Amino acid sequence: MEFKKKWMRFVYSQHLAFNIFWSEPWLDVVRHFRELSGTVKVLWPSEKEIADIETVVCTADDVAADLGEVGAPFYVIGATIMSDGRKSRDAKPIVNCLGGGSRRVMLVRTMNRVGERDQASDVLAHWIKLFDDFPPRWVNAICTDFASAYIAAGNMLQGPEQRPEHRRITWLPCAVHVYNKMLSDIGCSSSWTKDIIMRGRAMVRFIKEHVAALYSFKRESTQMGLIYSCETRFTSVFEMMERLLAVKSALERTVGSDSSGMVP
């Protein structure tokens, strides 16, 4: 029974197509394990059982029960919600919100903020909705990066116009982001380092945003991709430059290839 539960979670979490389990290669695997000698047999769930809606619902209930154990301390001592900001290394405005308690951390929500404004009022509106879904009585604080929109939203959260259950929630600036800003100032204190960072960022952005250039680069570098720096990610500038150095030969081959006309 325990094997079946783990197997079902694997199938559903990896978004495996159900028709895989009707395919002849998979049936060969099942037959192979069935014909093995020994007293311990692997009892694979049937293809009908895997695709059955009752199995899907039962597995979802099991996962929800496990998450309930993780979130149980939230009901007693509350949680701190942590957000990683709206900027990511692939330049997409994806915001992840985590809930941290006395035992573990769990993902609360992921938001795609494509086309949305990054103003304090918009940020606060997202926070309020997040608090209400959690709900507010289980939230002690929210921790974000030190961007100006979050500073303003944190001040607005304490405003008299907010509901008392929201006003009691404390906004905390992320210490790591503050340190990251300090390192950024140190790294850009010299003109030559600033020039290298700007050139590196421009190169990564161009390749990532142009399909032909990205295709040419991926042909030359099949193991490692490019890392786009992000001001709200700790040491991301260093990691971007470190990756550029690691794929230097691939970049040179990309520019020197037959498709070099597509890359400036």
Image: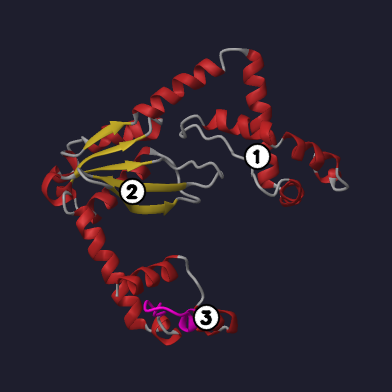
- Mark 3 → mark 1, Cα distance in angstroms: 49 Å
- Residue 219's mark? none
Residue picked out by circle 1? 205
Residue picked out by circle 2? 126
* Most common SS among magenta residues: loop
Q: How is the image coloured?
A: secondary structure
Left or right: 220, with 17 as reference point: right
> Of marks 3 and 1, which one's residue comes earlier in the chain?
3
Q: Locate the N terminus and report the quarter of the image it occupies.
A: bottom left
The residue at 66%/45% (across/down) is 208
How far across and how far down the image is residue 134, in percent? 23, 53
Residue furthest front as drawn: 38
- Residues drawn in magenta: 32-44
Question: Residue flagged by tag 2: what amino acid is it?
Answer: His
- Indicate which label's residue lies in the foreground, 2 or 1: 1
Left or right: 193, with 113 as reference point: right
Q: Secondary structure at mark 1?
A: helix
Q: Is residue 264 above or below residue 76?
A: above
How far across and how far down the image is residue 126, in percent? 33, 48
Question: In front: 139, or 65?
Answer: 65
Question: In front: 53, or 180?
Answer: 53
Neighbor class of circle 2 (other Cα within 10 Å; few <14, some 14-19, many 20+) is: few
Neighbor class of circle 1 (other Cα within 10 Å; few <14, some 14-19, many 20+) is: some
